Amino acid sequence: MEIKDLILEGKNLAGISEKKELQCKYDLWCSKVKASLKDADFSNRIQEEIKVKMHYMENEYSEIDTLKSLKKSMYSVIQVLEEKSVLPENGIDRQAGLKLIEKILDNFYMYYRAMYRQSVHKRGTLKAEILNAVQIGNEYDLQRMLYSILLPVFPTLRQEVCSDNGYGGMRADIYLDVFNLVIETKCTRKSMSEKQLLEELGADAFHYQAEIIYFFVCDRTEIIKNPEAFKQAFVREQEKDGKTVRMFILQAKEL
């Protein structure tokens, strides 16, 4: 059932004034909402938020109070549905949006080469020596470039977002709330070993509370000996591990 139809059905329940009838129809409506949210691939965070708002207080001594609580819960659920039911980010749904982000991360080197390394048009004002001088020196440079590419497609994207993991604060390089997605950028350096990189990324994967974590590593110093094995070491699945983790590597030879 479409979310917009569920919203309309929920609003129609407001006219019911008999407690038992409203309870029965409200419980059925809630079941439909839960099923539809799951089918529509809404994030677990949004599904849990709506489930919490579905709860109402039943007053065994006052039908009026029970009706008020029922309708208050119903309107709270409808409000969240109305906020979330419009396809996020310019009509891109969750599954398509994640695939698009993964494609950009996989092919980031194409952007870098086309923008900074390909020959310039002789009538253009951008000069080759200026563009060729642009280098990815550290993760802040990488973060800036990636954010600039993704922002036109995902306008609600944010940088340097702080969150509390229950022990200490964590700061996400790039965060997309609508997908509960963190993108963490890293650049290797001469003083870093592959083991050290593994430990840093492993700690981040453990502490971030987001549902989806994408690591984007620019291996400037070529310390990753086997990129494919390195990627596989970080793969985590939502169903089994409680979060989705993916690794993307930009190698020095691609720049």
Image (cartoon, helix red, strand yellow):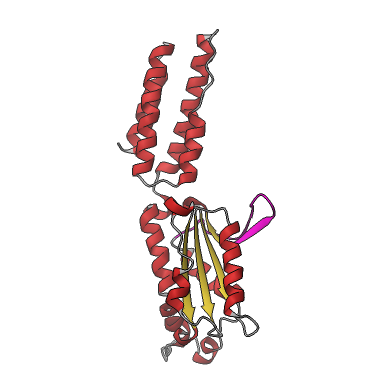
- For the residue pair 121 and 31, the one nearer the viewer reads as 31
The quadrant of the picture occupied by the N terminus is: top left
Residue 68's place in the image compared with 36, above or below, is above
How many numbered badges does the structure rendering display?
0
Residue 175's place in the image compared with 31, above or below, is below
| Residue 22: image location, x then y, percent | 40, 17
Q: State which region is magenta.
A: 154-173
Q: Is residue 206 left or right of residue 178?
A: right
- For the residue pair 35 and 97, the one nearer the viewer reads as 35
Residue 228 in sight: yes
Residue 183's place in the image compared with 23, above or below, is below
The residue under the point 61% across, 63% down is: 203
Q: Is residue 119 left or right of residue 208?
A: left
Q: Is residue 170 magenta?
A: yes
- For the residue pair 125 and 179, the one nearer the viewer reads as 179
By secondary structure, the bulk of the magenta-drawn segment is best described as strand
Q: Residue furthest right?
A: 168
- For the residue pair 127 and 72, the one nearer the viewer reads as 72
| Residue 207: image location, x then y, percent | 60, 57
The residue under the point 41% across, 66% down is: 102
Q: Is residue 195 magenta?
A: no
Residue 92 in sight: no
The residue under the point 62% across, 75% down is: 196
| Residue 69: image location, x then y, percent | 52, 20
